[in-house]
Image (cartoon, rainbow, N blue to C red):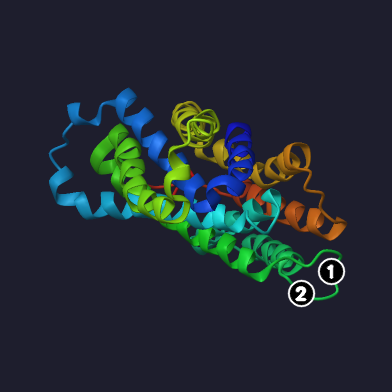
Amino acid sequence: MVSYQFGASLAKHLFPAVGAEGATAYRLGLSAIILVLLRRPWRSSPSSAKKDWRVLWGYGLAIGAMNFVFYMSLRTIPLGIAVALEFTGPLALALFHSRRPVDFVWTALVIAGLLLLLPLRGLDKPLDPVGVMYALAAGVGWALYIVLGRKAGAAYGATAVPLGIAIGALATIPIGLAHAGTALFSLDLLPYALGVAVLSSALPYSLEMIAMTRMSTRTFSVLLSLEPAIAALAGVALLSEHLGPLQWLAIAAIVVAAAGTALSTRRPVSEDEPLPIG
Protein backbone atom coordinates (compact mmCIF):
# COMPACT_ATOMS: atom_id res chain seq x y z
CA MET A 1 0.00 0.00 0.00
CA VAL A 2 2.91 2.34 0.76
CA SER A 3 4.43 1.51 -2.63
CA TYR A 4 1.13 2.11 -4.39
CA GLN A 5 0.61 5.53 -2.80
CA PHE A 6 4.19 6.61 -3.48
CA GLY A 7 3.59 5.66 -7.11
CA ALA A 8 0.35 7.63 -7.23
CA SER A 9 2.12 10.67 -5.76
CA LEU A 10 4.88 10.35 -8.35
CA ALA A 11 2.31 10.02 -11.14
CA LYS A 12 0.64 13.26 -10.07
CA HIS A 13 3.95 15.05 -10.65
CA LEU A 14 3.77 13.88 -14.29
CA PHE A 15 0.39 15.48 -14.91
CA PRO A 16 1.76 18.91 -15.98
CA ALA A 17 3.86 17.23 -18.68
CA VAL A 18 1.64 14.45 -20.05
CA GLY A 19 -1.65 14.78 -18.19
CA ALA A 20 -3.49 12.09 -16.28
CA GLU A 21 -4.02 10.29 -19.58
CA GLY A 22 -0.30 10.09 -20.29
CA ALA A 23 0.49 9.03 -16.72
CA THR A 24 -2.00 6.17 -17.06
CA ALA A 25 -0.36 5.09 -20.32
CA TYR A 26 3.04 5.17 -18.64
CA ARG A 27 1.87 3.16 -15.67
CA LEU A 28 0.08 0.37 -17.51
CA GLY A 29 2.31 0.27 -20.59
CA LEU A 30 5.61 -0.03 -18.71
CA SER A 31 4.05 -2.27 -16.03
CA ALA A 32 2.84 -4.63 -18.74
CA ILE A 33 6.33 -4.86 -20.25
CA ILE A 34 7.94 -5.49 -16.85
CA LEU A 35 5.43 -8.11 -15.71
CA VAL A 36 5.23 -9.92 -19.05
CA LEU A 37 9.04 -10.25 -19.12
CA LEU A 38 9.14 -11.43 -15.50
CA ARG A 39 6.16 -13.80 -15.56
CA ARG A 40 6.46 -15.01 -19.19
CA PRO A 41 2.76 -15.83 -19.53
CA TRP A 42 3.26 -17.49 -22.91
CA ARG A 43 4.82 -20.47 -21.07
CA SER A 44 1.51 -21.27 -19.39
CA SER A 45 -1.62 -22.10 -21.36
CA PRO A 46 -4.43 -23.38 -19.11
CA SER A 47 -6.85 -25.71 -20.85
CA SER A 48 -9.78 -23.51 -19.78
CA ALA A 49 -8.23 -20.31 -21.11
CA LYS A 50 -9.88 -20.49 -24.51
CA LYS A 51 -13.31 -20.63 -22.91
CA ASP A 52 -12.69 -17.68 -20.62
CA TRP A 53 -11.09 -15.11 -22.92
CA ARG A 54 -14.07 -12.78 -22.36
CA VAL A 55 -13.45 -12.86 -18.60
CA LEU A 56 -9.77 -12.08 -19.16
CA TRP A 57 -10.57 -9.16 -21.45
CA GLY A 58 -13.20 -7.91 -19.02
CA TYR A 59 -10.63 -8.10 -16.23
CA GLY A 60 -8.04 -6.26 -18.30
CA LEU A 61 -10.45 -3.55 -19.39
CA ALA A 62 -11.54 -3.12 -15.75
CA ILE A 63 -7.88 -2.55 -14.83
CA GLY A 64 -7.49 0.01 -17.60
CA ALA A 65 -10.70 1.88 -16.78
CA MET A 66 -10.05 1.83 -13.03
CA ASN A 67 -6.56 3.31 -13.41
CA PHE A 68 -7.65 5.88 -15.97
CA VAL A 69 -10.55 7.36 -14.03
CA PHE A 70 -8.57 7.23 -10.76
CA TYR A 71 -5.77 9.34 -12.25
CA MET A 72 -8.36 11.66 -13.78
CA SER A 73 -9.77 12.21 -10.28
CA LEU A 74 -6.32 13.13 -8.95
CA ARG A 75 -6.24 16.18 -11.20
CA THR A 76 -8.67 18.05 -8.94
CA ILE A 77 -9.06 16.25 -5.59
CA PRO A 78 -6.48 15.17 -2.97
CA LEU A 79 -4.98 11.68 -3.10
CA GLY A 80 -6.36 10.57 0.27
CA ILE A 81 -9.90 11.59 -0.59
CA ALA A 82 -9.70 9.98 -4.04
CA VAL A 83 -8.61 6.67 -2.51
CA ALA A 84 -11.32 6.88 0.17
CA LEU A 85 -13.98 7.42 -2.49
CA GLU A 86 -12.53 4.66 -4.66
CA PHE A 87 -12.46 2.32 -1.67
CA THR A 88 -16.26 2.47 -1.42
CA GLY A 89 -16.42 0.16 -4.46
CA PRO A 90 -14.95 -2.99 -2.87
CA LEU A 91 -16.48 -2.04 0.47
CA ALA A 92 -19.97 -1.85 -1.06
CA LEU A 93 -19.31 -5.20 -2.72
CA ALA A 94 -18.42 -6.77 0.64
CA LEU A 95 -21.47 -5.26 2.36
CA PHE A 96 -23.72 -6.44 -0.46
CA HIS A 97 -22.82 -10.05 0.41
CA SER A 98 -23.59 -9.54 4.13
CA ARG A 99 -26.96 -9.93 5.81
CA ARG A 100 -26.19 -9.41 9.52
CA PRO A 101 -27.48 -6.52 11.68
CA VAL A 102 -23.95 -5.30 12.49
CA ASP A 103 -23.37 -4.65 8.81
CA PHE A 104 -25.90 -1.82 8.95
CA VAL A 105 -23.47 -0.05 11.28
CA TRP A 106 -20.67 -0.29 8.71
CA THR A 107 -23.04 0.81 5.95
CA ALA A 108 -24.05 3.84 8.01
CA LEU A 109 -20.38 4.75 8.52
CA VAL A 110 -19.74 4.55 4.79
CA ILE A 111 -22.74 6.78 4.05
CA ALA A 112 -21.61 9.25 6.72
CA GLY A 113 -18.12 9.31 5.22
CA LEU A 114 -19.48 9.91 1.73
CA LEU A 115 -21.72 12.72 2.92
CA LEU A 116 -18.73 14.41 4.52
CA LEU A 117 -16.69 14.06 1.31
CA LEU A 118 -19.27 14.98 -1.31
CA PRO A 119 -18.92 18.52 -2.71
CA LEU A 120 -21.68 20.09 -0.62
CA ARG A 121 -21.75 23.75 0.32
CA GLY A 122 -20.77 24.76 3.81
CA LEU A 123 -17.72 22.52 4.08
CA ASP A 124 -14.29 24.00 4.76
CA LYS A 125 -12.95 22.91 1.35
CA PRO A 126 -15.69 21.78 -1.05
CA LEU A 127 -14.45 19.18 -3.53
CA ASP A 128 -14.59 19.39 -7.30
CA PRO A 129 -17.72 17.40 -8.32
CA VAL A 130 -16.10 16.10 -11.51
CA GLY A 131 -13.14 14.76 -9.54
CA VAL A 132 -15.52 13.12 -7.09
CA MET A 133 -17.41 11.41 -9.91
CA TYR A 134 -14.17 10.12 -11.41
CA ALA A 135 -13.12 8.71 -8.01
CA LEU A 136 -16.49 7.00 -7.51
CA ALA A 137 -16.23 5.59 -11.03
CA ALA A 138 -12.83 4.19 -10.02
CA GLY A 139 -14.64 2.48 -7.14
CA VAL A 140 -16.99 0.81 -9.61
CA GLY A 141 -13.95 -0.24 -11.64
CA TRP A 142 -12.31 -1.67 -8.52
CA ALA A 143 -15.43 -3.72 -7.75
CA LEU A 144 -15.43 -5.10 -11.31
CA TYR A 145 -11.71 -5.80 -10.99
CA ILE A 146 -12.40 -7.93 -7.90
CA VAL A 147 -15.26 -9.91 -9.43
CA LEU A 148 -13.61 -10.49 -12.80
CA GLY A 149 -10.15 -10.90 -11.26
CA ARG A 150 -11.28 -13.92 -9.25
CA LYS A 151 -12.71 -15.56 -12.36
CA ALA A 152 -9.67 -14.70 -14.49
CA GLY A 153 -7.35 -15.98 -11.77
CA ALA A 154 -9.25 -19.27 -11.58
CA ALA A 155 -8.86 -19.77 -15.33
CA TYR A 156 -5.39 -18.32 -15.96
CA GLY A 157 -3.63 -18.62 -12.62
CA ALA A 158 -0.62 -16.36 -12.08
CA THR A 159 -0.61 -15.28 -15.72
CA ALA A 160 -3.89 -13.39 -15.27
CA VAL A 161 -2.15 -10.32 -13.81
CA PRO A 162 0.41 -9.67 -16.60
CA LEU A 163 -2.14 -10.49 -19.30
CA GLY A 164 -4.78 -8.30 -17.68
CA ILE A 165 -2.41 -5.34 -17.31
CA ALA A 166 -1.33 -5.81 -20.95
CA ILE A 167 -4.97 -5.58 -22.04
CA GLY A 168 -5.44 -2.50 -19.85
CA ALA A 169 -2.38 -0.97 -21.49
CA LEU A 170 -3.78 -1.61 -24.97
CA ALA A 171 -6.92 0.29 -23.97
CA THR A 172 -5.21 3.30 -22.34
CA ILE A 173 -2.04 3.90 -24.37
CA PRO A 174 -3.98 5.28 -27.39
CA ILE A 175 -5.74 7.75 -25.06
CA GLY A 176 -2.41 8.81 -23.59
CA LEU A 177 -0.90 9.28 -27.05
CA ALA A 178 -3.88 11.29 -28.24
CA HIS A 179 -3.57 13.63 -25.26
CA ALA A 180 0.20 13.95 -24.74
CA GLY A 181 1.49 13.31 -28.24
CA THR A 182 5.27 13.16 -28.64
CA ALA A 183 5.77 14.35 -25.04
CA LEU A 184 5.07 10.76 -24.03
CA PHE A 185 8.40 9.74 -25.60
CA SER A 186 10.51 12.27 -23.72
CA LEU A 187 13.61 10.59 -22.27
CA ASP A 188 13.62 13.12 -19.44
CA LEU A 189 10.32 11.71 -18.19
CA LEU A 190 11.34 8.05 -18.52
CA PRO A 191 12.84 7.68 -14.98
CA TYR A 192 9.65 9.09 -13.45
CA ALA A 193 7.50 6.90 -15.71
CA LEU A 194 9.45 3.79 -14.70
CA GLY A 195 9.07 4.79 -11.07
CA VAL A 196 5.30 5.04 -11.49
CA ALA A 197 5.15 1.66 -13.25
CA VAL A 198 7.23 -0.14 -10.63
CA LEU A 199 5.77 1.51 -7.52
CA SER A 200 2.14 1.59 -8.66
CA SER A 201 1.76 -1.78 -10.36
CA ALA A 202 4.69 -4.17 -10.78
CA LEU A 203 5.91 -4.14 -7.16
CA PRO A 204 2.61 -3.84 -5.21
CA TYR A 205 0.77 -6.41 -7.34
CA SER A 206 3.61 -8.89 -6.83
CA LEU A 207 3.82 -8.22 -3.08
CA GLU A 208 0.05 -8.50 -2.85
CA MET A 209 0.04 -11.96 -4.37
CA ILE A 210 2.76 -13.07 -1.92
CA ALA A 211 0.86 -11.60 1.05
CA MET A 212 -2.41 -13.29 0.12
CA THR A 213 -0.73 -16.72 0.17
CA ARG A 214 0.64 -16.16 3.69
CA MET A 215 -2.27 -14.67 5.62
CA SER A 216 -5.98 -15.18 6.06
CA THR A 217 -8.53 -13.28 4.02
CA ARG A 218 -9.70 -11.50 7.17
CA THR A 219 -6.19 -10.29 8.09
CA PHE A 220 -5.53 -9.20 4.53
CA SER A 221 -8.81 -7.28 4.38
CA VAL A 222 -8.22 -5.54 7.72
CA LEU A 223 -4.78 -4.41 6.61
CA LEU A 224 -6.21 -3.28 3.26
CA SER A 225 -8.67 -1.04 5.11
CA LEU A 226 -5.73 1.19 6.07
CA GLU A 227 -5.19 2.24 2.46
CA PRO A 228 -7.28 5.47 2.52
CA ALA A 229 -5.37 6.63 5.61
CA ILE A 230 -2.01 5.77 4.05
CA ALA A 231 -3.03 7.65 0.91
CA ALA A 232 -4.03 10.71 2.92
CA LEU A 233 -0.70 10.71 4.76
CA ALA A 234 1.17 10.28 1.45
CA GLY A 235 -0.75 13.25 0.03
CA VAL A 236 0.26 15.40 3.00
CA ALA A 237 3.90 14.29 2.99
CA LEU A 238 4.59 14.13 -0.74
CA LEU A 239 2.07 16.48 -2.37
CA SER A 240 1.38 19.04 0.38
CA GLU A 241 -2.32 18.19 0.24
CA HIS A 242 -3.65 19.32 3.61
CA LEU A 243 -7.15 18.13 4.48
CA GLY A 244 -9.76 19.73 6.71
CA PRO A 245 -11.04 18.15 9.94
CA LEU A 246 -14.27 16.92 8.35
CA GLN A 247 -12.35 15.30 5.51
CA TRP A 248 -10.07 13.46 7.95
CA LEU A 249 -13.19 12.38 9.85
CA ALA A 250 -14.73 11.05 6.62
CA ILE A 251 -11.61 9.04 5.80
CA ALA A 252 -11.56 7.65 9.35
CA ALA A 253 -15.22 6.59 9.03
CA ILE A 254 -14.51 4.67 5.81
CA VAL A 255 -11.41 3.02 7.31
CA VAL A 256 -13.38 1.90 10.39
CA ALA A 257 -16.22 0.60 8.20
CA ALA A 258 -13.80 -1.41 6.07
CA ALA A 259 -12.00 -2.86 9.09
CA GLY A 260 -15.30 -3.61 10.83
CA THR A 261 -16.63 -5.40 7.77
CA ALA A 262 -13.51 -7.57 7.61
CA LEU A 263 -13.43 -8.31 11.34
CA SER A 264 -17.10 -9.23 11.53
CA THR A 265 -16.81 -11.82 8.78
CA ARG A 266 -17.66 -15.14 10.37
CA ARG A 267 -16.55 -17.50 7.68
CA PRO A 268 -13.90 -17.58 4.95
CA VAL A 269 -14.74 -16.12 1.59
CA SER A 270 -15.93 -18.83 -0.77
CA GLU A 271 -14.86 -19.25 -4.34
CA ASP A 272 -17.98 -17.45 -5.53
CA GLU A 273 -17.49 -14.38 -3.38
CA PRO A 274 -15.22 -11.48 -4.24
CA LEU A 275 -11.92 -10.92 -2.48
CA PRO A 276 -10.69 -7.31 -2.28
CA ILE A 277 -7.30 -7.48 -4.01
CA GLY A 278 -7.16 -4.10 -5.73
* Residue shown at 69% from the left, 67% from the top: 128
Q: Which is nearer the eye, 228 or 172?
A: 172
* Residue shown at 27% from the left, 52% from the top: 57
Q: Quadrant of residue 48?
A: top left
> SS for tag 1?
loop
Q: Find residue 216 and report its horizontal and vertical position in percent.
A: 51, 34
Cα–Cα gap, marks 1 and 2: 7 Å
Three-letter residue code for mark 1: Leu
Q: Which is nearer the eye, 98 or 251?
A: 251
* Residue shown at 73% from the left, 43% from the top: 235
Q: Find residue 50 and report its horizontal and vertical position in percent.
A: 13, 46
Q: How many marks?
A: 2
Query: Do the CB atoms of the residues marked 1 and 2 lie less than 8 Å apart?
Result: yes
Vertical placement of 197 versus 57: above or below?
above
Q: Residue furthest bottom?
A: 121
Please tell me the numbered disc located at residue 120. Answer: 2
Instruction: Note whether residue 33 is visible.
Output: yes
Q: Find residue 246 and report its horizontal and vertical position in percent.
A: 83, 60
> SS for tag 2?
loop
Q: Quadrant of the N terminus?
A: top right
Q: Residue furthest top?
A: 38
Vertical placement of 122 versus 193: above or below?
below
Three-letter residue code for mark 2: Leu
Label 2 Cα neighbours within 10 Å, binned few <14 / some 14-19 / many ≥20: some
Instruction: Write down the residue under mark 1.
Output: 123
Instruction: Note whether residue 272 is visible.
Output: no
Q: Find residue 66 and report its horizontal and vertical position in percent.
A: 47, 54
